[in-house]
Image (cartoon, rainbow, N blue to C red):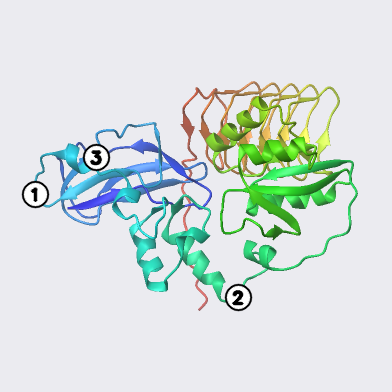
């Protein structure tokens, strides 16, 4: 009997939406059959069987629901099975493959690499350790590159001395923080003074010369009361639920939250912006646009006149809205998306990359780009 779990495919995604369950529990299947389909914000994935046998899905598995990496999807057995409750009550990968005194979820393929290379899993800040993460780590341990975040922890990098009007604290000290700091360094009125992170391997280090402290509500409140910083912002965007949770914690404790806008952003007249928002380079905000709280907007996005945007949304690069659109809360947008005028997009939806949105999207729905692309090798002999 073999077990099939949701494994991490994109480093930025911690959960996936189930879009198709092709079989019923107890059905006979063949090697290569697609047994599950699921989606992230940017791509669609099919999981196929590695064997012939009888498939049994997790009784809790439902269509149009999000499940975290490590969730036990199904088992495939050579013979029909009884007592499924005992099988699925074993839980996720963390319960089965727990080792090295950690609470992290580790996939089978990742565990083989970790064991063979004697890697301490606690150096990773990811909750889910996949094969992709370990392979990326192994490719960089020999020689840290300019694009590797470890370069910025391990090297002393000098930036010009700053004396901004506002001292800023940042939650998260990973690659999202680096991207945010790039914007902050372009501004003249903000000094980043402290970073908070829950990755024990980087606590006490610096990122671009900025101190990294343990992430906790108590520390954040104490530092604010000691006037270490004036405002705070959340850098990461991959986990919307966690981003929302931290926003609500900060807000309930009356910690002031900043907006960070790259200096190349165009902000029209009569615009109302909430707090905790990040706008990266070359974003345009048209007149009479209302923007809520805690949104992350990537480069080259555009919100035309009279758009209304809610809270806790994330946007990939080049998401373009026509006029009078209404965007709800906790929506994830991919890259290169176009939205027609007056379209309404409901809460908790996912709009995949490359979509053209012409109709309203109800809440808890995913819009897929079904375009097919053909990859053909160039004949170099001609």
Q: Is residue 376 visible?
A: no
Q: Is residue 201 above or below residue 347?
A: below
Q: Residue at x 59, y 24 (%)?
A: 328
User: Which numbered disc, 3 or 2, marks the residue closer to the eye?
Assistant: 3
Q: CA distance from mark 3 to mark 2?
A: 43 Å
Taking depth in this image into account, of 199 and 362 the one nearest to the observer is: 199
Q: Which residue is mark 2?
A: 143
Instruction: Report which quarter residue 63 is drawn in.
Output: top left
Residue 6 sits above or below residue 268 on the image: below
The secondary element bearing badge 1 is classed as loop
Number of numbered markers: 3
Say which of 324 and 116 sits in front.
116
Residue 82, quarter of picture: top left
Q: Is residue 228 above or below residue 245?
A: below
For label 3, the residue is 89
Position in image of residue 6 (x %, y %): 36, 47
Residue occupied by mark 1:
79
Disc 3 and disc 1 in contact, CB within 8 angstroms: no
Question: Which mark is first along the chain, 2 or 3?
Answer: 3
Q: Tell which tag, 1 or 2, sits nearer the viewer.
A: 2
Q: Residue at horizontal 56%, vertical 43%?
A: 238
Image marks 3 and 2: residues in contact by CB distance under 8 Å: no
Viewer-proximal residue among 341 and 326: 326
């Amino acid at each position: 009997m073999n077990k099939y779990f949701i494994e991490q495919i994109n480093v930025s995604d911690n959960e996936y939406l189930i879009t198709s369950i092709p079989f019923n529990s107890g059905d006979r299947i063949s090697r290569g059959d697609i047994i599950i389909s699921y989606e992230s914000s940017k791509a669609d994935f099919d999981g196929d069987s590695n064997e012939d046998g009888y498939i049994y899905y997790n009784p809790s598995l439902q269509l149009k629901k999000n499940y975290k990496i490590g969730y036990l999807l199904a088992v495939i057995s050579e013979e029909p099975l009884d007592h499924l409750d005992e099988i699925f009550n074993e839980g996720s990968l963390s319960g089965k493959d727990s080792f090295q005194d950690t609470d992290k979820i580790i996939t089978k393929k990742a565990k083989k690499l970790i064991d063979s290379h004697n890697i301490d899993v606690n150096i990773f800040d990811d909750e889910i350790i996949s094969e992709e993460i370990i392979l990326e780590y192994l490719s960089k341990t020999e020689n840290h590159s300019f694009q590797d975040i470890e370069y910025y922890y391990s090297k002393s990098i000098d930036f010009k001395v700053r004396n901004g009007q506002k001292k800023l604290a940042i939650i998260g000290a990973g690659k999202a923080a680096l991207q945010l700091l790039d914007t902050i360094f372009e501004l003249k009125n903000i000094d980043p003074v402290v970073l908070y992170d829950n990755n024990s391997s980087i606590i006490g280090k610096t990122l671009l010369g900025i101190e990294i402290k343990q992430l906790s509500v108590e520390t954040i409140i104490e530092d604010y009361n000691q006037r270490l910083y004036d405002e705070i912002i959340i850098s990461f965007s991959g986990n919307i639920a966690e981003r929302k949770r931290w926003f609500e914690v900060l807000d309930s404790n009356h910690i002031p939250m900043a907006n960070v806008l790259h200096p190349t952003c165009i902000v029209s007249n009569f615009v109302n912006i909430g707090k905790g928002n990040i706008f990266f380079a070359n974003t345009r905000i048209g007149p009479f646009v209302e923007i809520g709280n805690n949104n992350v907007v990537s480069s080259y996005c555009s919100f035309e006149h009279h758009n209304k945007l809610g809270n806790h949304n994330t946007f990939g690069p080049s998401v373009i809205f026509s006029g009078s659109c209404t965007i709800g809360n906790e929506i994830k947008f991919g890259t290169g998306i176009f939205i027609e005028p007056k379209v309404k997009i409901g809460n908790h939806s996912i709009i995949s990359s490359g979509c053209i949105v012409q109709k309203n999207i109800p809440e808890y729905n995913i819009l897929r780009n079904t375009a097919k692309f053909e990859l053909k090798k160039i004949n170099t002999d001609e």
